[in-house]
Amino acid sequence: MKKQLYSLLAFFLMYASAFAQVSPFKVFLEPIAITDLGGLQAYAFATHNGKWLVLGGRLDGLHRRQPFASFDVAGNNNQLIVVDPISLQRWTAPLTSLSIDLQEQLSSTNMQFHQSGKYLFTIGGYGYNNATAARKTFDKLTVIDVPAVINAIIAGTAFTSYFRQITDAKFAVTGGHLKKVNNTFYLVGGNRFNGNYNPMGNPTYTQVYTNAIRKFNVTDDGVNLQITHLPEIVDATNLHRRDYNVVPQIMPNGIEGLTAFSGVFQLSIDLPFLNCVNIDSVSHVVNPTFQQYYNHYHCATLPVYSASANEMHSVFCGGIAQYFDSAGVLVQDNNVPFVKTIARVTRTANGSMAEYKLPIEMPGLMGAGSEFISLENIPRYANEVIKLDELTSDTTLVGYIYGGINSSTPNIFFTNTGTQSIAGSQIFKVRLLKNPTVGMDALNVQSTGTLKVQVYPNPNDGKFTVIFNLVKPAEVKISLVSISGKVVEERVLKNLKQGENIFERNIRAIENGGTYLLTVSTPYETAVQKIIIEP
């Protein structure tokens, strides 16, 4: 037994050390506080001269289980907020001087937004509609003159003339992303959710995913807005996503693009996507060789590119995920808990992608619904990707993270009454250290592997299904070992087919439950995951 345990520990030590990489940069977080700022999550923002304009979002934490309390009006952010992170000041103004249509959209949650020059474009969002006395996804595009509104709020003067709004059914989207590639806007993914949210499954709402990238151009003379819709890209399998991350990219060929990471839900099961979709001005392509295991829900993201190495780095800060790391081994939890993980996805010059867990973590179970607010004066591409090679100091302040959901424990969804989480008011300064001489980021080898192992359900009571992929017919060994090193079961499956394979088990010998290591091995690859078996 001891020999088995020592062999197991030696394997994981070798496994962890063999698959690590010297960090291309380090990330440092420094907390700062602004008096009376208040907590906020799932909001929109823009910047001007170092100040932030913040609007929309929720003042509470994760939406509650009780249908009558989910997304209640009391949790709406009904103010425009200006923040100066240097002087640690904040100013506010109520939305009440604006039209009802503007008030409703600009107090909604999960709007899509993008700042282009001095204008903030906001689309859709989910919130309360007075006309129907119910919640809906708003079919609005609002354009905001950011410098003028910031100056008016600080001065306490009128700002109503700095908002323009139009109605368009294609803009009735929430939980997606609005980005710009060259001169074209991209409204990526999301859904139209009308009616009162009800997690109990009762038919109090309708939900339709866009399954699309909706592209459009805007002609704006400063008074009139003209929208020219372009042919949209529809992909009901790969673009069926919401509440995820779309990160600006510099592609290996040097052009600007986007990558859509993870999101919910897969068509066949209520779990996050693990793959990603690369988007440029020509097409969208699913990367079949990469799997993202950490950071599946919308969270603060940092896009960083090194031109000298032709490497694109996307950093994800906390949030919600189906997986987290424990001593170098993936733990799968299909309840999709809140996590602390900060991870980096790197695309190399040949287009290959891999996921690395950074040694730093979020200070708590936070990050979901937060945003990274970049400094305007650091070297950036037009799409706001940070130019790593042009950061002149060893350590550079590149921006801030603000808000998001702070959860008291990892899994609160099925018990949430409103007290288990809050909207965070914490601000973090974000610094990058270039070319660190020490420090390793742990490669998640399964992110570049081909087995794509998943276990359902997990946690489980000893009855579970293992799903894995084979790139060619092979013999597969599946073993289940306790943390103490006891081999619970070991099976060799011969002559399995190429493609997806399913292995179902009912382990009756486990009485007390616990955490176990599930290993799937082929002659060419091995994947290890921790699973939880409950008594």
Image (cartoon, rainbow, N blue to C red):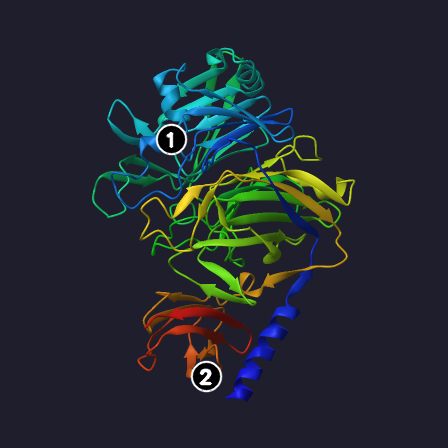
- Mark 1 falls on what kind of element? loop
Mark 2 sits on what residue?
486
Q: In the image, 276: left or right of 381?
A: left
- Residue 439 vertical position relative to residue 209 in the rendered view, above or below: below
Which residue is more in the foreground, 461 or 387? Answer: 461
Tell which residue pokes out farthest to the front in this image: 35
Label disc, if present, on residue 313 of the rendered structure: none
**Percent of width and height locating residue 505:** 33, 76
Quadrant for residue 419, please give it: top left
Amino acid beneath label 2: Lys
Label disc, if present, on residue 76 of the rendered structure: 1
**Percent of width and height locating residue 417:** 31, 46
Mark 1 neighbour density, 10 Å: few (under 14) some (14–19) many (20 or more): many
**Percent of width and height locating residue 515:** 43, 72
Q: In the image, 175: left or right of 281?
A: left
Kindly tell me whether residue 156 is visible in this rendering.
yes
Q: In the image, 136: left or right of 352?
A: left
Quadrant for residue 79, please give it: top left
User: Split into 4 quadrants, where in the image is the C terminus?
Assistant: bottom left
- Mark 2 falls on what kind of element? loop
Which residue is more in the foreground, 274 or 530? Answer: 530
Quadrant for residue 140, please give it: top left
Amino acid beneath label 1: Asn
Which residue is more in the foreground, 300 or 237? Answer: 300
Residue at figure coordinates x 61%, y 74% from the top left: 13
